[in-house]
Amino acid sequence: MKITQVEAIPFAIPYRKPLVFASGEVHTAAHILVRVHTDDGLVGTAEAPPRPFTYGETQASIKEVVESIFAPAITGESPYDRELVHARMARTIANPTAKSAVDMALWDIIGQATGVSVTQLLGGFTDRMQVSHMLGFDEPEKMADEAERMLETFGISTFKVKVGRTPIELDVAVCRAIRERLGDRIELYIDGNRGWTASESARALRKMDDLDLSMAEELNPADDVLGRRWLVEQSTIPFVADESVSTPADVTREILGGSATMVSIKTARTGFTTSQRVHHLAESLGIEVVMGNQIDGQVGSLCSLAFGAAYQSTSRRAGELSNFLDMSDDLLATPLEISNGELLVRQAPGLGLDIDEDKLTRYRQDR
Ligand code: MUC
Ligand code: MG
């Protein structure tokens, strides 16, 4: 089987409720759908979400690098030869979500060709993931309302609250309002997207000491290595590295350097092949992981779910799999459905992505 064509299709679907956080905001899912075609008619699919505030990629840059550099470099190769494809793509530095979408599309093809789901190909630990919902900036009572609605409607009981605003009291009030509203029915953790300084982070954590936060993610800048180490030393909860660990080598540096104690695995930035390396590395280092979200649509969320369910450590905690709930529409013919706070892995071969071609025609931006 040979790769014959790689498509990079730009599409845009508005958010009903935009997500606002310390490093940026997302009003429209203006992503790239990557489709890898083969000579025996199989098509692998994945999506790349441009996140310029995190990786420097844009929708235009992803389309360009996939079509002009990656496609010619891998056309004619076998989709099974993922290491070769990665070596070819690695000649171009950075571009993590573009590379990851190509990688995941290959796994989708391999699953379809072998009649096995990607979750089983990767490890097959379970058939489901608990879902964690991310709450973007708003007023305390509105964010508590949103959390309550998610609990009542979808059974979601784990919430990641976006923090990193100043004065820090704004976010402290939000976390307090949510904890007061929902008590011990929920797990609560925070993500600062590098918005606070180390000393602001320390003060905020002290003020929230009674709120039983389970984790703290990227509170201060990734480059503030000493500040991060200082925070880790005084904290009683795990410090999750997200933006600071785009590659397995970053994981090694962050963990051995003592500036984080956990990592977020995002298939949007490390695909399946490199996410496997991050997973294995985390296991070797003896640290916990959480499945993160790159503000993915349903295609990307299905990819995260497929990976998260494959291993014991990635499915142990609730995965961030619900940002698509805030979108006005999506591309799957059979939408993802969260019930009892869980998402079920699709049992179909590959990823089980059934793209609704009419919707793709409606939302694609290149025709
Ligand atoms: C997250 O976990 O930080 C927002 C910025 C980004 O890089 O990812 C999202 C969610
Ligand atoms: Mg984060």
Image: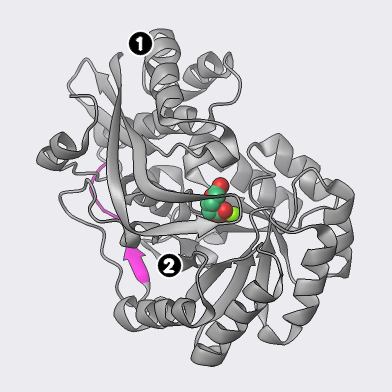
Q: Which residue is mark 1?
A: 75
The quadrant holding residue 197 is bottom right
Of residues 210 and 199, which is closer to you in this image? 199
* N-terminal-most mark, 1 or 2: 1
Rendered residue at 72%/35% (across/down): 249
Secondary structure category for the residue under label 1: loop
Q: Position of residue 71 (x, y in %)?
A: 38, 14
Residue 295 visible? The answer is no
Q: Identify the magenta region.
A: 342-349
**In the displayed structure, would residue 154 be above or below residue 233?**
below
List x then y, in percent, for residue 293: 48, 53
Residue at numbered disc 2: 131
Q: Quadrant of residue 339?
A: bottom left
Residue visible at 63% across and 81% down in the picture: 173
Q: Residue furthest front?
A: 167
The local secondary structure at tag 2 comes to strand
Residue 140: where, in percent of width, then height?
A: 53, 79
Q: Which amino acid does the dot numbered 2 rest on?
A: Val
Residue 86 is labelled as none
Q: Quadrant of residue 287?
A: bottom right
Asked if labels 2 and 1 touch by Cβ distance under 8 angstroms, the answer is no
> Spatial distance from mark 1 to mark 2, Cα to Cα?
37 Å
Q: Nearer the viewer, residue 327 or 160?
A: 327
173 in magenta: no
Badge 1 crowding class, 10 Å Cα cut-off, few under 14, some 14 to 19, many 20 or more, is some
Front-most of 185 and 208? 208
Residue 347 colored magenta?
A: yes
**Which secondary structure class fits the magenta region best?**
loop
